[in-house]
């Protein structure tokens, strides 16, 4: 069987909930769609869809396979669109949403370079730390922190890095450095309203330490600023403090116990053809957030 056509038929049925709607979108007969999906299931040896008289829905295996098919189909479309648009001069406006810290620390310092490369693209950027609804807001792309589990979007992880426990040199000069996660109970910790416990890896097991301090803040931006001011020890995702660590403004501790941080991803709605202007901003964001080979994160 043609595996690619089977995947396309399966994805359309999964998204529309109907063999008839899928056939209409693919411009083929309903029987052709039904046969393609049935052959795919037979080839895989598993059932992907739960069929009823009114609707077709994904089962657990189907949901997992659906997400993998989407990635494959999008990669194929991306490859074709990349070749076809290679000679285009990207132009026009893009509506984007960035978390505050990402926009300020990662994108804005590189914005001039982007405009030097693509002078005909206008970026309309909003700042929002939440996982916004791109379609509802009319956005072309967003950068979002955390796991992305929305089948309407393509999500590409930019990086994860580690959760970094750190403080300013001035703080450590007065209070000393913790040697183990348990030592944090003796330190002034800058707690986050969203993360009242800090995770660590102790001898292969995940351990959570409840931290205390004179400040409980909401938002990574405020936590980072407090740490830079020497107000206590903080735990943040690596990408938010990477420049501060390089410049010596913050010092990392408890590195042997660090756990993987939350992913930061670029997210955009599914589209049959990704416009060249959108492709270049995606590639640029990948470039400026790439963890250097051999980097000590």
Image (cartoon, rainbow, N blue to C red):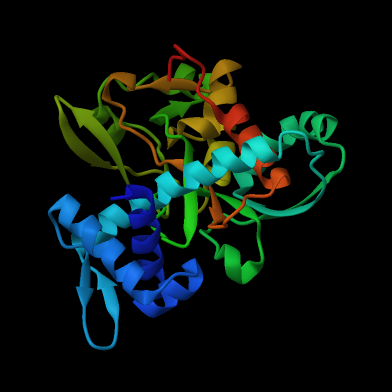
Give the total of numbered labels.
Answer: 0
Query: Can you say whether 155 is above or below 203 in the image?
Result: below
Query: Can you say whether 78 is above or below 9 in the image?
Result: above
Image coordinates of residue 224 in percent, x first then y, are: 55, 37
Residue found at x 79% / y 39%: 88
Q: Quadrant of residue 17?
A: bottom left
Query: Can you say whether 48 is above or below 190 in the image?
Result: below
Image coordinates of residue 240 in percent, x first then y, are: 54, 34
Residue found at x 28% / y 53%: 65
The C terminus, quarter of image: top left
* Residue farthest to the top, as pictured: 294
* Residue farthest to the bottom, as pictured: 54
* Residue farthest to the right, as pictured: 119
- Between 202 and 99, the residue placed more toward the observer is 99
Residue found at x 34% / y 68%: 32
Image coordinates of residue 278 in percent, x first then y, are: 68, 46
Q: Is residue 199 left or right of residue 288?
A: left
Q: Is residue 54 visible?
A: yes
- Between 273 and 128, the residue placed more toward the observer is 273
Q: Is residue 101 left or right of residue 236?
A: right
Residue found at x 63% / y 37%: 82
Q: Quadrant of residue 287?
A: top right
Q: Is residue 265 visible?
A: no
Image coordinates of residue 270 in percent, x first then y, are: 53, 57
Q: Is residue 156 left or right of residue 6?
A: right
Q: Is residue 140 left or right of residue 54?
A: right
């Amino acid at each position: 069987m043609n595996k690619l056509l089977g995947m396309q038929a399966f994805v359309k049925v999964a998204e529309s909930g109907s063999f008839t709607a899928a056939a209409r979108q693919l411009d083929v007969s309903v029987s052709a769609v039904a046969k393609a999906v049935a052959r795919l299931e037979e080839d895989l040896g598993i059932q992907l869809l739960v069929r009823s008289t009114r609707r077709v829905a994904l089962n657990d295996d189907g949901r997992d396979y659906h997400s993998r098919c989407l990635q494959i189909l999008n990669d194929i479309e991306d490859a074709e669109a990349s070749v076809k648009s290679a000679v285009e001069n990207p132009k026009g406006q893009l509506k984007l949403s960035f978390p505050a810290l990402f926009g300020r620390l990662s994108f804005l310092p590189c914005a001039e370079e982007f405009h030097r490369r693509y002078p005909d693209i206008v970026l309309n950027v909003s700042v929002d730390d939440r996982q916004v609804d791109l379609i509802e807001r009319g956005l072309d792309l967003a950068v979002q922190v955390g796991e992305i589990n929305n089948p309407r979007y393509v999500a590409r992880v930019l990086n994860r890095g580690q959760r970094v426990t750190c403080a300013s040199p001035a703080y450590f000069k007065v209070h000393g450095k913790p040697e183990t996660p348990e030592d944090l109970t003796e330190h002034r910790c800058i707690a986050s309203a969203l993360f009242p416990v800090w995770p660590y890896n102790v001898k292969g097991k995940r351990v959570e330490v409840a931290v205390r301090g004179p400040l409980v803040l909401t938002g990574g931006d405020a936590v980072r600023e407090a740490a830079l001011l020497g107000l206590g020890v903080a735990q943040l995702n690596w990408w938010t403090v990477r420049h501060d660590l390089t410049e010596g403004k913050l010092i990392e501790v408890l590195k042997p116990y660090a756990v993987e941080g939350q992913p930061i991803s670029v997210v955009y709605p599914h589209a049959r053809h990704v416009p060249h202007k959108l492709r270049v901003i995606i590639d640029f964001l990948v470039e400026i957030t790439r963890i250097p080979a051999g980097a000590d994160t």
